[in-house]
Amino acid sequence: MGTAEVVGFGGKSPGEVLEVLSAAVTEKAIASIVPKRSQNIELDLLNAPYRTFLSNTDSSSSKKNLIIYCLPSTVTEYMTFGSESSAIRSSILSGSGDVVAVFDTASSSFVGGDAKSILSALSGDNAEASAALASAALASLSKLDGLAASQLSPAGRNDIVIIVGSGGREHALAVAVARSPLVSQVVCCPGNGGTAVEGGKISNAEGVNGKQDNDTVLALVKRLGAHMVVVGPEAPLVDGLVNVLKEECPDVRAFGPTKEAAILEASKAFTKDFLEEYDIPTAKYKNFTDANEAIAYVESLDIDGGDRQVVKASGLAAGKGVLLPTTKAETIDAVKEIMSDRAFGDAGDTCVVESFMTGPEASCLAFCDGKTAVLMPAAQDHKRALDNDEGLNTGGMGAYAPAPCVTPDLQKEIEAMCIKTVQKMAERGTPYVGVLYAGMMLTPNGPSVLEFNCRFGDPETQVVLPLLETDLYEVFCACCDGTLEEVDVRFKENTSAATVVCAALGYPEKYPKGMEITGLTEANAISGVKVYHAGTYLDNEISRCSGGRVLAVTGVGPSLKDGLSASYNAVRKLAFVGSNGDGLMHYRTDIAKGAINKKLRIGVLGSTRGTALIPVIEACANGTLNAEIVAVVSNKSKAQILDKGKALGVTVTTKFVSSKGLSREQYDAECTSVLVGAGAEYILLIGYMRILSGSFCDFWSGRCINVHPSLLPKHAGGMDLAVHQAVIDAGETESGCTIHEVTEEVDGGPIVIQKVVKVESGETAESLKAKIQPLEGKAFVDAIGKVCGKEVISYADAGVDIEAGNELVEIIKPACKDTRRPGCDADLGGFGGLFDLAAAGYDSANTVLIGATDGVGTKLRIAQATNNHKYVGIDLVAMCVNDLIVAGGEPLFFLDYYATGRLAVEEAASVVRGIAEGCKQAGCGLIGGETAEMPSMYAPGDYDLAGFSVGAVDRNSILPSNVGAGDVLLGLTSSGIHSNGFSLVRKLLEKEGMGYESPCPWDSSAATIGDSLLTPTKIYVKSCLPLIKNKLLNGMAHITGGGLLENLPRVLPKGVVAEITGHPALPAVFKWMQETSGLDDKEMLKTFNCGIGMVLVVKSDKVEEAKTLLQTVGETAFDLGVLVSGEGAQVVMKRCLS
C-alpha cells in the first residue's frame, strides 16, 4: 500500500504541497497520508479545493511511497530534528525507489522539480524526474550542514541576550531563549531570585541595583556587547527604550515595539479609535477628556435596562484601570473615580466608556515583525483571587493553553485581526515589532477585541512558551529583521500546559513578605514541571518572597488534564514559611476546571426538518447535557434543520455544502472540514439522506452516531415507513429506535442505546412511526449523555430555574399593581386572586359573570424572531376582553398563563408588562397568573401565552338582545391584522423572500415589517362600554378568526341577513396581503378582519347618539350596512373590498 509521509511542515500547509497530496490520492497512487510534525496538513487537506482525507479507502495504490520534507527554516530546527534529515538521506541513498521531494518555504517551491514532475515520478514512468528531485534534496541538506557547522562551531554564533524585567514572564523568556544553541548568555535586568539561581546560560545583571530604566539598560548593553534586548514589561516600551536602543546601538536587535507603536497599550482611547477606523471588531465606545461630558453620556444610556458599560482609564494603570460597574449610578461613580478623583493619576486624563461584552475571554499572543503576525496558541487566564472566580481581581492566578474555546476557525479569524493590525500600524508609519497581546472576547456575535497589550502576558507566557517548538531566539531575530514569513513558527502537537500561581496569603490586598520558599527542588524534579519565579529574591542562597504573586508552577503534558495534574502535584510540594513557622501561601484549586469539564462540542449533519434535534437543543440549553451544538451542515440548501442551526446564533456554524461535481469522499471531506473548523468533536446524523464514505467513517470512528427507526440489528438498511411496515409484517410485538455508531456498514455499527414501544393489534406503518419518531430526539439525548457524563441531579438540572421565577414575580409586581380597580388590589403572591363584586358596584343577586379565554396564536413567532415582546401581552388581553364586551359585560379581572422551555426573566417581564398595559386599557385588574417552565415541551426561545378574563353584566342587559331587521351596523376600525391570520402572513413573506427586518412595503412609517405586524390588537372596552351602559346596543361582534363572514352571524338570529353596503376600502396592509396571496374578497373576509375589528348592532333611531358617544372617546364609526329579513348566507357583500 503506497503511503505519503509529510514531514516537518508544522503549522504551514503550502498550496503546492496540498495539490500534490490530493492528486496522489485522487489518482489512486497513494492509500494514506502520514503527517509528521505537520499538524495543519490534515485539516487543510479537507478544505476545498483539495477535499482529501488522510486515509483513502478507495485506492488501488501505488507500490511506491512518497516523502515530502519541509526544509527547516532555522539551523536550530535542523539540528534538533536531525533524525528527519538523516532518514531523507537514507531513503535516497539506499535506492528504496521512494520518491523524495523537498519543499523550501523561503522560495515557496519544491527544489529540483514541481508538482507535475513529482506525480510523474510517483507513477513510475519518469526516472529522470525522480533523480532530479533526489539530487536537489541532497544538495539542500548539504547546504544546511555547512550553515550549521559555521553557526554552531566555537567560532560561530555566541550571542548575548538581555531580558528586561523581573517577573515570572521574564523568567520564562530567559529559559526559552537560553535553549537556543546560538545564544551563549542570557542576562536578566534586573531579574529575580529564580533567574539568579537558574544557572547555565542564565544570570542576573550585576550592578543594576534592581533598576530597568533606559539608561541602566543602555549601559548594560554596551558593557556586555549584547546582540539583542528583549523587553518584558510595558513601562520601558512606553518610555521609549526601543527608540533609545535603535539610536544608540543600531546594530543591536531590540525585540519590542517603539514608543510610537506601544501606544496600542499606552492609550486605550487610541486603540479604540484605531479598531473602529480599520473595522476590527470591538465594543461600542466613546472617549472623553471631560468628566461632565462622560457623565452626560452615561446618563443618556439605558444601563439599568440592560445596556451595561465598562469604564476604563485610557493610560497605563498597572492593570487596575478597568472598572466594571453594574448600575447607572455605579457607572457614574466609576467615571468620577477615574476622571475627577484621579484614582489612576494621569492614566485617567482620558476615559473610555464602552459596552459590556459577554462570552469567554481568550488571551491571544502574536509574534510581529512590522509586516505580518503569527498567532500563538490561545490561552485563558484566571483573574480573580479565589476559587469559582470570586474575590478581587489580580494580575492572574493561573492560565492554560491551548484554550479549547478557540476553535481552528476562530484561531484563523483572530490571527487575521492581528495581521491587519500590524499592517495598518505600518501604513501609519509606526511599524509594530514584538509581541501583540490581543485580549479577545468570544461574544455571541463572534470574536471582538477587548484590548491590546504591547508585550507578553503574565501568566500566559508561562504556558505558551513551553509549547513552542521553534527556536524562540531565531523567531525574535526574524521579528527584528522583518523576515518572520521565512521562519516556520511551530508549536508542539498534542501538548498542553497549565500554570498555577502561588501567591502570598492576603494578595491582592495587604500581604506579608520575606517568607522562606521551601520545596522548590522537589517541585522542579516532577516530570513536565517548571517553577517560574516572579516575586522572589535570594537571601544567602535561600529563596524568599518579595511580592504578591510569587511563583508560577507550569505543568506540561499530552493533555490539559495531564499538564494540570503535574502542576498541582508540584504546588503541593511548595510552602511559604513565615518567621513563626506559619504557612503563608495561597493558590486557587480550580485552574482550568471549566476547560477540563468543557462541554462536548456537537456537529450535526442533516437533510430534513431536524425534528429530533429539538430535544438535543433543549438539553444543551437547560444543562441536562454538558454539551453544545457548534455546527449544523446540510446537503440541502433549504433543509429546515439549517433554520434550527441559525436560530442558535452566529457563533454556530450553519452551512449548506453542495455535492455538485464531487465524489462521495470529496463531499464528505469538505463537510468534515466545516465540522472540524467549528471545533466539533462528536457528530449526529439527523435525517441525513446520504451514504457516507469509508474515509468519513474512519475519520469520525467512535465519534459519530445515527438513529435508525427499528430495534437493530433487525431491519437494518431499511428506511422510514418501509421499516415500520416490515416490523408489522413480521408480526413483531415490539419496535422502537436505535442509536448506533456509524461505520462503513450501513446500520451495522455498535449499538449505543435503544428506545422500545409496543406494537399494538391493528397497528399501521403510519401509527407506528408516530409512536417512534418522538423517541428519536430523546434517544439522542441519552446517547450524548453517555459520552459527556452529565448526571441529572436537581430540578435546576432538569431546566427549571425556580430563582428566575421568583425574580420575575418581583419584577412584574409594580406593573400588576398599576392595574388596581375597585374590587381588587392586583397583588401577586397568593394562591388565588380575589375580586369583590360589591366593591365594584354590582348587585350579586342580579349579576351574571362572563368568562373568556384566548391566546395570541402564531403572532408570537414574530415577537420571538424579532425579540420584541412588549406588545403581545396587549394582544392577549384584547383577544379576551373584546370577547367579553360583546356579551355586554364589563371586564373585571384578568389572569395569564406563560409557558416556556427556559425562563428568560427580562423577556417574560416584557410580556407581562404588556399584559398589564392591556388591562389598564380595558379597565380590569391583573390579579394573578402562572409561569410554567417546561424544557421538555418547548424549544429554547419559545413560549406560549393564554389569557383568562372574567366580566360582569346585569342579567337584564346581556347581549345580543332584540336584534332584528332594520337594525344598523356600525363598524369600528382595527389597528391592523390584530392576532389572526399570521400563519398565512408568514407564508406570504416567505414567498416574497422577505424577513421581519425587511423594510415594510405597506407602511413607510414602520421601520420594518416586524414592527408593523406587531402593532397590538385594538381594545374596544372603553369605546363601547358607554354605549352599553346607555343601552344603545342590541349586539356586537368581535371580528377575529373567521373574519366578518363567520363572526357577524354569531349575533344574528335566524331569518336575519346582514347586507354590507359600506365596507371601507382595504387598509394598505390588507391590500398587500390580497395582492400577494391572490385571495378573492370572500377568502379575505374569512381570513382577516380587513380593517373592521368590531361590529356594533344599533337600532336605527339610536345611530346618531351612538356615533356621538363614540366620537367623544376618539372613535370613528363606519356605516357598515343594515340587517334585513332573509334566508341563506347571513352576510351578503353588496360592494367589493377594492
Image (tube, rainbow, N blue to C red):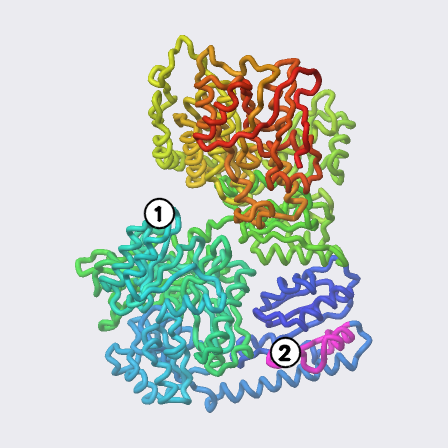
Q: CA distance from mark 1 to mark 2?
A: 56 Å
Q: Is residue 418 above or below residue 1030?
A: below
- The residue segment tinted magenta is 95-122
In the image, residue 374 above or below residue 221: above
User: Circle 1 is placed at which residue position?
Assistant: 304
- 424 or 590: nearer the viewer: 424
Q: x, y percentage for residue 325?
A: 32, 53
Q: Residues within 10 Å of mark 1 (few under 14, many from 20)?
A: few
Please tell me which residue lies in front, 349 or 951.
951
User: Disc 2 on helix, strand or loop?
Assistant: loop
> Which residue corresponds to the image point at 43% horizontal and 39% vertical from the top-left?
910
Determine the residue positioned at 62% across, 29% down: 1062
Q: Nearer the viewer, residue 599 or 1124?
A: 1124
Q: Position of residue 740 (x, y in %)?
A: 65, 42
Residue 108: image tag: 2
Say which quarter of the image contains residue 385.
Answer: bottom left
Of residues 268 and 1035, the one drawn nearer to the viewer in this rendering = 1035
Label 2 amino acid? Ser
Mark 2: few, some, or many residues within 10 Å (few <14, many ≥20)?
Answer: few
Amino acid marked by disc 1: Asp
Residue 116: in magenta span: yes
Count of labels shown?
2
Reply above or below: 936 against 585.
Answer: above
